[in-house]
Image (cartoon, rainbow, N blue to C red):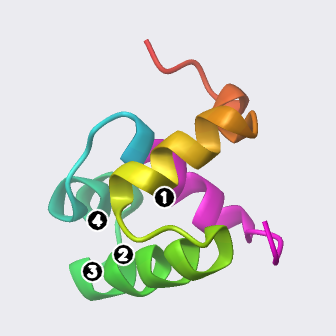
Amino acid sequence: MSDTLTRRECDVLLLICRGMANKEIARELNVTVKTVEYHVTHILGKLGARSRTEAAIAALEQGLANLVDLS
């Protein structure tokens, strides 16, 4: 990971790991879908991922998803 994720980016990434769509994430975090898209773009760049799936895999491999119970 080239850059450190912000706290909000971690929040978004964890919800991506739960399989949530941008609209669901926006509702959960009480922000706009555009804001979620902004964070997703930054997450992908920082993780060097080409997709949300790659970002979720990177999170799992790097232990980032362990911050929250994913069950």
Cα–Cα span, label 1 and label 3: 12 Å
Which residue in the protein does label 1 denote?
Answer: 12
Q: Quadrant of the C terminus?
A: top left
As helix, strand or loop, the secondary structure at mark 4 comes to: helix
Cα–Cα span, label 2 and label 3: 7 Å
Cα–Cα span, label 1 and label 2: 7 Å
Magenta segment: 1-15
For the residues bearing labels 4 and 2, Cβ distance under 8 angstroms: yes
Cα–Cα span, label 3 and label 4: 5 Å
Q: Few, some or many C-alpha atoms within 10 Å of disc 1 (few <14, some 14-19, many ≥20)?
A: many
As helix, strand or loop, the secondary structure at mark 1 comes to: helix
x, y percent for residue 13: 51, 54
In the image, taking residue 45 as reference, residue 37 lies left or right, namely left
In the image, taking residue 3 as reference, residue 27 lies left or right, namely left
| Circle on res. 26 | 4
Establish if 58 lies above or below 5. above
Question: Which kind of residue does numbered mark 3 sit on?
Answer: Thr
For the residues bearing labels 3 and 4, Cβ distance under 8 angstroms: yes
